[in-house]
Image (tube, rainbow, N blue to C red):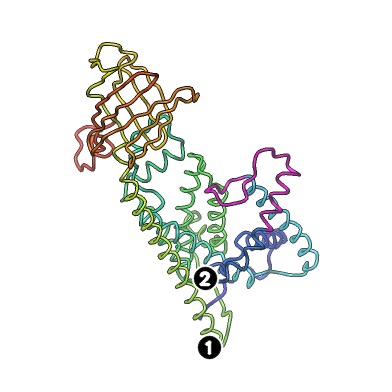
Amino acid sequence: MEHTITLTASWGRGSLIAFRFFFAYFIFYIFPFPLDFLPKISGLFQPLTDLSAAICSYIAKNLTGVEHEIYGTANGSGDSTLNYVQFFIFMAYSLIITIVWSVTDRRRKNYEKLLYWLIILIRYYVAAIMISYGLAKILKTQFTFPTSDRLHQSFGDASPMGLLWTFMGYSTPYNIFTGLGEFIGGFLLFFRRTRLLGALIIIAVMSHVAMLNFAYDVPVKLFSLHLLSMAILIVVPDAKRLLNIFLLNKPTIPETSHPIYFDAKTKWYYMIGKGLLVVIILTTNIMGQLEARKDIEEHLKTSNRYDPLLGEFDVESFELNGEVVPPGKMDTRRWKKVIINQKNIDIQSTDGGSIPWHFHGNNYGHKIILLSHDLSTMGNFRFVSDSSSLIMEGTLNQDSLKIKLKKKSENQFVLVSRGFHWVNEFPFYK
C-alpha cells in the first residue's frame, strides 16, 4: 500500500511560506510534465510554450535593455537571455501566488499530502531527465570520441566546453560509469522505498555536473541547478533522520507513515497508472537514444568520404612554377606542413611561419579552394588523394604549385595510441 510521508503535525510559518513558493515555482518549471511524454498530447501545449517564449522575448527586448539578438528557439543553450527572463518571471509569478495563498489559507497547519504529491511529481520528472542523460552517456550519444578535426585542432584553440567534451568523449568506460550513476539514481526515484537512495545519488551526481558546467562554461547551468535543487527537495522530509545518522551519531526511527488511500480499487488504478508512466518514460528514452546513436553512426560513415582531406600532412615535395624547391631554400614560401579541418587550412612554411586560410574541399570534383581571411587572395587546386597521401596542383598568388603531402595517421596521436597500462614505472605526462 502506498504511504504518505508524515512530518510534524504543525509546520512553522516559514516552512508554510517556503512550501507555497516552491510548490508554485516547480509546477511552473516542469509543466507540462508528465503529459509531454504521452503520444499526440505534447503538441497540444505548443501554443502555450510559444506564447511563453513570446512574452519572455518581449520583456527581454523592451524592459531589460538587452540589445543583442534574443533567440526564441532551441539552440543548445539553456542559459540564454530568454532562459534567465523566464526564470525571473517564474519567480515573480510564484511570489505573487505565495502572497495570495498565504493570505487566503493562513489557518493551514501543514501541507503534508500536497508535499507528498509534489515530491512524487518531482521524483518522476527528475527520474525521466536523469535516465535520458544516463543513457546518452552509456550509449555515447552525448560525448563521442574526438573526431579528426578535433585531434588536429590546436590545444589552445579549444573552448572550455570543447575541452570538456573532448575529455569526456575520449573514455568510454568513464562515460558508462557516469551514465550508470545518472541512470541508477533516476530509476530508484520511481519507487517509494528506494527514493531516498536515488535522491542521494542524484545529489552527488548533479553536484559534480553543475560544478563542471560552471568550471567549463557549459550553458546548462540553470538546468543543472534546478535538477540539483529538486533532488534536495526529495530528501528534505528525511533531513532529520539523515542528520541523526551522519552527523549527530544519534539513533533514528523508521519513516512514520499512514495510508493515502484505503480501498483496493484506488490502489490498482494508481499502480496501473504508475506502471504505464514508468514504461512510457523508459521506452521513450531508450528508443530516442538508440535512434540518436544510429544517426551518429550514419553521420560518421557519411563523413568518412571527406577524411582524405582532413588531418595533418607533411610536405614531401614542393614545386614552384615547375621547379622543385628543396627544404632550406625559399623558407618563407616553401610549405613544410599543412593542417586541414572542415573549414580552415593552416599552411606552415619551412621557416616556422604559419598562415591560416579559409578552406573548401569538394571530394567528388577533386577540387580545393583556398581563400585568405581578408578575402583578397584565392587559390584553386585539383587534388588526388588516398588514405595516406594528398597531391595538390594548382595556382596561388599567380604562382603554379604542385605539392605532394603525406598524411599523419591518427594513431600517431598520443591521445589515440597511448591506451591503458596497469603498470607505469613513471608518470606518462606529455
Q: In the rendered image of this protein, does residue 140 appear above or below residue 114?
A: above
Q: Is residue 79 magenta?
A: yes
Q: In the rendered image of this protein, does residue 113 appear above or below residue 375?
A: below
Q: Earlier in the sequence, mark 1 or mark 2?
A: 2
Q: The C terminus lies in which quarter of the figure? A: top left
Q: Secondary structure at mark 2?
A: loop
Residue on which disc 2 sits: 255
Residue 325, x across and y down, in percent: 25, 15
Residue on which disc 1 sits: 264
Residue 418, x across and y down, in percent: 23, 38
Q: Is residue 320 magenta?
A: no
Magenta region's main secondary structure?
A: loop
Q: Is residue 32 left or right of residue 197?
A: right
In the displayed orientation, state which residue is furthest to the right. 103
Callout 1 touching callout 2 (CB < 8 Å) = no
Q: Nearer the viewer, residue 19 or 316?
A: 316
| Circle 1 or circle 2, nearest the eye | 1
Magenta residues, as a range? 51-80
Q: CA distance from mark 1 to mark 2?
A: 23 Å
Residues packed near mark 2 inside 10 Å, few (<14), some (14 to 19) or many (20 plus): few
**Residue type pointed to by label 2:** Glu
Q: Nearer the viewer, residue 370 or 126?
A: 370
Q: Nearer the viewer, residue 293 or 370?
A: 370
Q: Quadrant of residue 348?
A: top left
Residue 389, x across and y down, in percent: 23, 33
Q: Is residue 129 visible?
A: yes
**Residue type pointed to by label 1:** Ala
Q: In the rendered image of this protein, does residue 204 appear above or below residue 12?
A: above
Q: Is residue 69 left or right of residue 2?
A: right
Query: Which residue sits at x=52%, y=57%?
Result: 243
